[in-house]
Image (cartoon, helix red, strand yellow):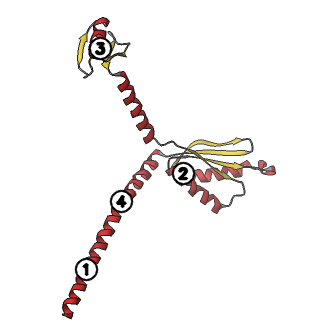
Amino acid sequence: MRLIDDEGSQVGIISLREALQIAEERELDLVEVAPNATPPVCRLLDYGKFRYEQSKKEREARKNQKQSDLKEVRLRPKTDDHDLEVKANRARRFLLAGDKVKFTVRFRGREMAHPDIGRDMLDQIADSLRNVAIVEQRPSMEGRALSLLLAPDPKALKAAQQVQARAAETAKQQPSDKLNAKGRDEDDDLEDDDLENDDEE
């Protein structure tokens, strides 16, 4: 087997017995890292510490990864154009936050005879959100409901995140600017008071 020591340098090709002896002397574990290589590659390391660092990295990666939720916006065939606009704007906020949005048009009774009305509504919404969303699932009937699934457009999402980051930076800087301005005003007031006192004398 090919052995790599705990500092990452190659020891060379040695027998299993020799590798185990070296691991025992250094109080480390002998771990096979590339079993399919010829000869197999093994490494000397503290396995407990290695597992701890791996799980720590995985936790960090999970923390930085945003879980996208599925938000549902419900509509009716009789939903007014203005209400449709309001719901589209709400969906835009969801999409820019990284969530998927499912639009559902529910039909009751005789409304089932006119699924084209719902389809037109969903097409209109998809068209109004095309700059921030991509259609993941075209309008399809699910029982008495017609559904459209939109996912955030990666480019639009990235741009929105950059805008939010810049806004957060400027928000951090503004309080200190206000304090400086306030401090200067107070100094100016003090100078004015001093001048008035001098005049009185």
Q: Look at the image and tell me in which quarter the C terminus lies.
A: bottom left
- The quarter holding residue 182 reads bottom left
In terms of secondary structure, where does tag 4 sit?
Answer: helix
**Number of the front mark, 4 or 2:** 4
- Residue 59's label in the rendered image is none
Label 3: few (<14), some (14–19) or many (≥20) C-alpha neighbours in 10 Å: many
- Residue 94's label in the rendered image is 2
Taking the image as shown, residue 148 lies to the left or right of residue 111, namely left
Label 1: few (<14), some (14–19) or many (≥20) C-alpha neighbours in 10 Å: few
Instruction: Give the tally of numbered discs.
Output: 4
Please provide percent x and percent y for residue 66: 47, 43
Cα separation between marks 1 and 2: 48 Å
Q: Look at the image and tell me in which quarter the N terminus lies.
A: top left
Cα separation between marks 1 and 3: 74 Å
Identify the amino acid type marked 3.
Ala
Residue annotated with mark 1: 188
**Can you name the residue that lies furthest to the bottom here?**
200
Taking the image as shown, residue 146 lies to the left or right of residue 198, namely right
Which residue: 36% across, 22% down?
47
Label 2: few (<14), some (14–19) or many (≥20) C-alpha neighbours in 10 Å: many
Identify the amino acid type marked 2.
Phe
Instruction: Name which of mark 4 and mark 1 comes first in the sequence.
Output: 4
Which residue: 26% across, 22% down?
8
Label 4: few (<14), some (14–19) or many (≥20) C-alpha neighbours in 10 Å: few
Give yes or no for contact between labels 1 and 2 (Cβ–Cβ under 8 Å). no
Instruction: Name which of mark 4 and mark 3 comes first in the sequence.
Output: 3
